[in-house]
Image (tube, rainbow, N blue to C red):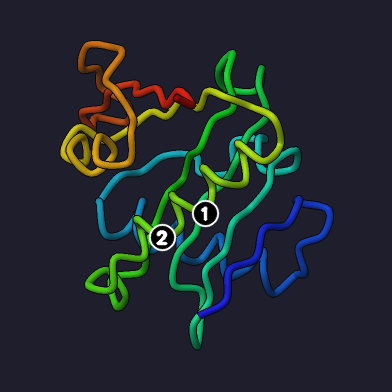
Amino acid sequence: MNIEIKHFDDLSTKDLYEILYLRCKVFVVEQACTYQDCDGKDTDAYHLMLKEDKLAGYLRILRPGVSYEEVAIGRVVVDEDYRHLKFGKKIMNEAISFILSQGYDAIRISAQLYLKDFYQSLGFEVVSDMYLEDDIEHIEMLYKKS
């Protein structure tokens, strides 16, 4: 298992292809949700990649002011072949550590409602009512360094 965090400018063409492939595989095909994945935010983001024999897990980190006032984590995804290995928790913990090491003390996410307990186990708290995003129930959650 290998975890890399790269700014968009440092991604290889292969990295970018694998990221977009996995995001499309899960968010568009598996979740049957037609939406514009390439939203213009990737080019100013850090991309965390967990690689096994292929890209197994991924998320992106957005600086304050891009999506929220705080740093944001989004597009959290684990390939279905690796979900039983708890890679979601691994990549989230790596992202939190990276963000805190950069001097930030708060992280906001837009979480799918069914993952509320997962994110709460990582220290996030619900800070909004449920809302629909691309016809999927979401909530905003906030992590504050204690």
Q: Quadrant of residue 45?
A: top right
Image-based side of 78 in relation to 66, left or right:
left
SS of the residue under disc 2: helix
Q: Amino acid at mark 2?
A: Lys
**Can you say whether 93 is above or below 138 in the image?**
below
* Residue nearer the viewer, 146 or 137: 146
SS of the residue under disc 1: helix
Disc marking residue 94: 1
**Residue at image x 29%, y 23%?**
125
* Circle 2 crowding by C-alpha within 10 Å: few under 14, some 14–19, many from 20: few
**Can you say whether 23 is above or below 135 in the image?**
below
**Residue at image x 32%, y 41%?**
122
x and y percentages locating residue 31 in the rendered image: 25, 51
Q: Amino acid at mark 1?
A: Glu
**Can you say whether 58 is above or below 133 in the image?**
below
Q: Quadrant of residue 83?
A: bottom left
Callout 1 touching callout 2 (CB < 8 Å): yes
Which residue sits furthest front? 146
Image-based side of 12 in relation to 1, left or right:
right
Which residue sits furthest bottom? 53
Residue wearing tag 2? 90
Disc marking residue 132: none
x and y percentages locating residue 118 in the rendered image: 23, 44
Real-space CA distance between mark 1 and mark 2, rounded to the nearest whole angstrom: 6 Å
